Image (cartoon, coloured by chain):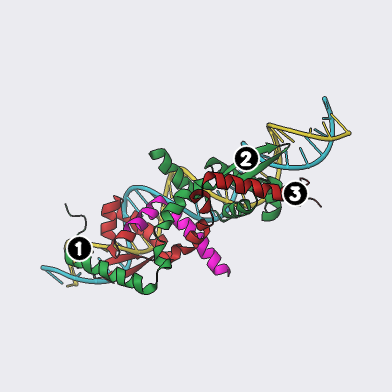
Chain colours: A red, B green, C cyan, D yellow
Amino acid sequence: MAATALTTAEIFRAIAEPRRREIIDILVEQNDLPVGDLVQRLRLPQPAVSKHLSVLRKVGLVVVTKQGQQRLYRLNPQQLKPVHDWIKTFEQYWTRSLERIKLRAERAALERKNATPKPSRNQSS
Amino acid sequence: MAATALTTAEIFRAIAEPRRREIIDILVEQNDLPVGDLVQRLRLPQPAVSKHLSVLRKVGLVVVTKQGQQRLYRLNPQQLKPVHDWIKTFEQYWTRSLERIKLRAERAALERKNATPKPSRNQSS
DNA sequence: TTGGCATATTCCAAAAACGGAATATATTAA
DNA sequence: TTAATATATTCCGTTTTTGGAATATGCCAA
């Protein structure tokens, strides 16, 4: 569905920010942290942290619970699954040996060449 | 080193663009494609495709070889490894059963609570 | 050399992202 | 109620990104 695809794109954009990945890295090892702790550890002005948290919240990467006057942020890693699914496709390219990859690529190239002569088609018509 | 970290950030930004991920998806299943083929399959204006390819080229995600008047683009998946390494940390959260995760989280929370009473410290000084 | 095809680059305007400063909101304490 | 603390939001100026149109470059064929 389109909604899911859109969310996925937003997730990718959300984690494209180095600071936001830092926040995620902190939250994965220590959940339910108040904003103040993140401010301390990131050495960023509080509004900056809150803004990054806002982005992460909107795409569901973190969830908040109120505790007194502070807000505890918890990572919601499920939202990273689409990214993992996408990147997993390429795993083979560095887990397998270089020789295998080369062979595989060459074999594939050969098959392609034999199947279709590839007449350098561009926008025909 | 700083150079590597910078590149990693650039990789994340490069794949944040949906069209560029599409390009990568196409190239992973069929390597050494001329730009014209990508234009066809993406249904995008040629300059747009060339610009996206330029971004991917700059971060090393694709490499070009000249063949006559056309440029063949090939995916260089190695550059995706940092992304994979990062996302892999979270794999456990959806591969393991929900019960285990819950238990793990609760156990961790308990340990934390017992270890440090967490005196709601903010910027003290 | 000229013309045509494939691709890249530049220029431009619009949109989005970002940091910093100020301010608003919510909650607790006095 | 007032003050203080924790956090969120808004405003603003700057930079980055993006798409579209036009143009440039590179290469081949005639």
Q: Cβ–Cβ below 8 Å for labels 3 and 2?
A: no
Which residue does the image show at 46% across and 63% down from the upper left? A81
Which residue does the image show at 54% across and 69% down from the upper left? A3
Which residue does the image show at 59% across and 44% down from the upper left? A102
Residue A114 — which label?
3
- Residue type at tag 3: Asn
Q: Is residue A84 left or right of residue B24?
A: left
- The spot of residue A104 in percent (x, y) is 61, 49
Secondary element at tag 1: loop
To which chain does the residue with label 3 belong?
A
What residue sits right under mark 2 in the picture? Answer: B64
Q: Which residue is nearer to you in this view: A108 or A6?
A: A108
Which stretch appears magenta?
Answer: A1-27
* Whether residue A35 is visible: yes
Q: Nearer the viewer, mark 2 or mark 1?
A: 2
To which chain does the residue with label 1 belong?
B
Q: Nearer the viewer, mark 3 or mark 2?
A: 3
Any magenta on residue B105? no
Q: CA distance from mark 1 to mark 3?
A: 69 Å
* Whether residue A69 is visible: no
Q: Cβ–Cβ below 8 Å for labels 2 and 1?
A: no
Residue B120 — which label?
1
Question: Are the residues under badges 1 and 3 in a single subunit?
Answer: no
Q: Is residue C21 left or right of residue B113?
A: right
**Magenta stretch, main secondary structure class:** helix
Q: Nearer the viewer, mark 1 or mark 3?
A: 3
- Using the rendered view, name the quadrant where residue A51 is placed: bottom left
Which quarter of the rendered picture does the N terminus of chain B lie within?
top left
Q: Which residue is nearer to you in this view: B43 or B103?
A: B103
- Residue type at tag 2: Val
To which chain does the residue with label 2 belong?
B
- Residue type at tag 1: Ser
